[in-house]
């Protein structure tokens, strides 16, 4: 019988807390928050977990050399099980989307699933990897908007895609380390994303204060601090921490996008998950 703890580590289960905000931000941007949104969140999490399982299946030989503690090289999970789990979770994610939105929902969910599989099996070790992962996150935001409302959610999708591009670029060097230029570029990108979201929030104010300022500050401080530390010491340990901070930093960034569209209560609920995500990340690494 498969060890449940091994499966949790395989799919980086707690890291899925960084996923619901994509769908919520897309739905808020398109004014489509409604009964279908929780189902789309569930579908998005399934596709995320599928990608994590598929990632370890595709990287099993590399992990045997560089990360022998991962479930497959450690012998805790069979590689065939990981592949089957990825396929099953993908099917469930697409099925939930269809139940929630009908076949129209597959217009976004199917390309999202294809992007996840294409990244893990073909593109991960190519120069196209960061752009492909960014596209997956952007599509995740658009999933929340729904077909016919994609244009309204496009700015939020671009923001999440840009942040994901930065995190993925860093992750490609987290085992071997890098020069200072790479984390310095990531830090500049984080500052750019912060500026863009802050500028967009200026158009919506609560009692004279731009909406989403608090979660945006948390994003800039948390992600920026880890990236600055990597600039000072661009070794594997600091880069891994910067990547982890970038993944968890998606939560306050998504919250800022939600608050900027007037969904302040939803943004507050999402931010409440950040301490839990941080606590769980100490037990199950998000990378």
Image (tube, rainbow, N blue to C red):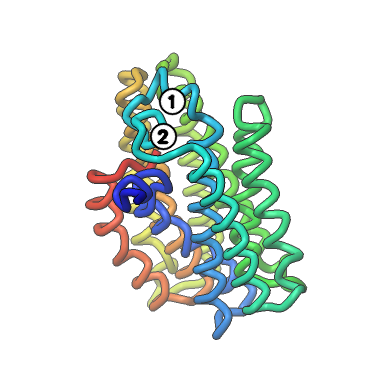
> Label for residue 72?
2
Near mark 1 (Cα within 10 A), the count class, few <14, some 14-19 or many ≥20, is some
Q: Which quadrant of the structure image shows residue 241?
A: top left
Relative image position of residue 255 (x, y in whole percent): 43, 63
Out of 219 and 69, give the one closest to the viewer. 69
Relative image position of residue 198 (x, y in whole percent): 48, 56
Residue drawn at x 47%, y 63% is: 21
Q: Nearer the viewer, mark 2 or mark 1?
A: 2
Q: Which quadrant of the structure image shows residue 285?
A: top left
Q: Is residue 5 left or right of residue 178?
A: left
Residue 28 vertical placement versus 111 (above, below): below
User: Are discs 2 and 1 less than 8 Å apart at CB?
Assistant: yes
Residue drawn at x 31%, y 37% is: 225
Relative image position of residue 13 (x, y in whole percent): 38, 53
In the picture, which quadrant includes the C terminus? top left
Which of pointers 2 and 1 lies earlier in the amino acid sequence? 1
Q: Is residue 98 left or right of residue 6?
A: right
Out of 40 and 165, give the one closest to the viewer. 40
Out of 126 and 226, give the one closest to the viewer. 126
Near mark 2 (Cα within 10 A), the count class, few <14, some 14-19 or many ≥20, is many
Out of 277 and 32, give the one closest to the viewer. 277
| Cα separation between marks 2 and 1 | 8 Å
Residue drawn at x 31%, y 19% is: 233
Residue 32 vertical placement versus 93 (above, below): below
User: Which residue has dot 1 on it?
Assistant: 63
């Amino acid at each position: 019988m498969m060890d449940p703890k091994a499966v949790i580590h395989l799919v980086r289960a707690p890291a899925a807390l960084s996923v619901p905000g994509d769908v919520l931000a897309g739905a808020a941007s398109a004014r489509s928050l409604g009964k279908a949104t929780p189902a789309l969140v569930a579908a998005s999490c399934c596709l995320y977990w599928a990608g994590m399982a598929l990632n370890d299946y595709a990287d099993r030989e590399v992990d045997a050399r560089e990360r022998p503690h991962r479930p497959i090289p450690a012998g805790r999970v069979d590689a065939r099980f990981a592949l089957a789990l990825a396929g099953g979770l993908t099917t469930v994610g697409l099925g939930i989307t269809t139940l929630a939105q009908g076949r129209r929902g597959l217009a976004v969910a199917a390309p999202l699933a294809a992007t996840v599989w294409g990244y893990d099996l073909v593109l991960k070790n190519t120069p196209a990897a960061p752009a492909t992962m960014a596209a997956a996150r952007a599509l995740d935001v658009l999933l929340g908007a729904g077909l016919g409302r994609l244009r309204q959610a496009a700015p939020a999708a671009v923001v999440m895609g840009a942040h994901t591009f930065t995190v993925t670029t860093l992750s490609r060097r987290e085992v071997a380390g890098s020069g200072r230029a790479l984390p310095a570029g990531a830090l500049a990108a984080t500052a750019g994303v912060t500026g863009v979201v802050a500028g967009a929030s200026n158009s919506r104010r609560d009692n004279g204060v731009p909406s989403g300022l608090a979660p945006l500050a948390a994003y800039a401080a948390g992600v920026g601090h880890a990236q600055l530390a990597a600039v000072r010491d661009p070794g594997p340990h600091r880069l891994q921490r910067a990547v982890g901070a970038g993944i968890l930093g998606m939560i306050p960034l998504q919250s800022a996008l939600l608050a900027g569209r007037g969904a302040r209560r939803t943004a507050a609920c999402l931010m409440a998950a950040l301490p839990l995500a941080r606590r769980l990340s100490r037990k199950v690494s998000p990378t």
